[in-house]
Amino acid sequence: MTMLAVAGCVPFGGDGDGGGQGDGDPTAASAPTAHRSIPPGFIECDGRPPKDGELVADVDLTTLTAPDPPRFHEASGYYEDNPVEGDWTARYWVPDDQQASLDVINLLVYPQMDLGPLTVTCDMISWRDITDRIATYHEINGAEVIEETTQTSVAGLPAVREVVDLPGSGYSYLGYWIFGRGQVAHLYCQWVDDEATIVAGCEDFIGSVTVS
């Protein structure tokens, strides 16, 4: 699995050396103070990261990929009926013994976000911004929440898990949102008839997703 390196924040520059008191060279106090070096693995950033933040998925989400889950095969002839962020790319998998045409696993990526990118501060996105954006998606696609959003990870990347029903589309799904820098991925497993097969396949699918 590809792991997301955790980056912390340190203030720009450093504190001056307080020094001792007493006699000394008066010109020394006016000398410029050297900035502390930034430790490896940390980044410099303006502002403070959100207290309730989640790390941004700092990869190109169009490179997400997965093998065929066991007892599933990749399929064509499908399309996204409820796009929420404009243009998209997608792959689809169906059970070998598919019971209904809408029992499908989807890997969908929006390479650009028509609603606007979420604010990233110190590699973090506010959890409130994330849940507000997902709520907007629900308004667009008519989703009714069955299980509330929870934080998790997919392929080592921060992700948001939910279970929803789409009455207008005629199916329910277990889904995962991954928010990147101006991109978002939606990995979801939808069912009409065979929930058990789709959910089992979804576990294998999510566990096998990688960044190529």
Image (cartoon, helix red, strand yellow):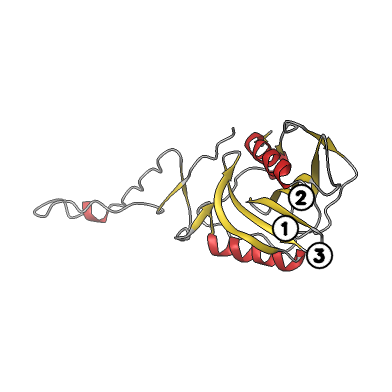
Question: Could you tell me residue 75's position as x and y percent?
Answer: 85, 38
Q: CA distance from mark 2 to mark 3?
A: 14 Å
Judge from the rendering whether residue 206 lies leftward or rightward of residue 30; answer left or right: right
Q: Amino acid at mark 3?
A: Gly
Q: CA distance from mark 2 to mark 1?
A: 26 Å
**Disc 3 to disc 1: CB gap under 8 Å:** no
Q: Of label 3 and label 1, which has the lower sequence position?
A: 1
Q: Amino acid at mark 1?
A: Met
Q: Residues within 10 Å of mark 3 (few under 14, many from 20)?
A: few
Q: Is residue 18 above or below residue 75?
A: below
Question: Could you tell me residue 11's position as x and y percent?
Answer: 40, 54
Which residue is identified by label 3?
168
Which residue is identified by label 1?
113
Numbered mark located on residue 191 in the image: 2
Secondary element under disc 1, as helix, strand or loop, is loop
Q: Amino acid at mark 2?
A: Trp
Q: Of label 2 and label 1, which has the lower sequence position?
A: 1
Secondary element under disc 2, as helix, strand or loop, is strand
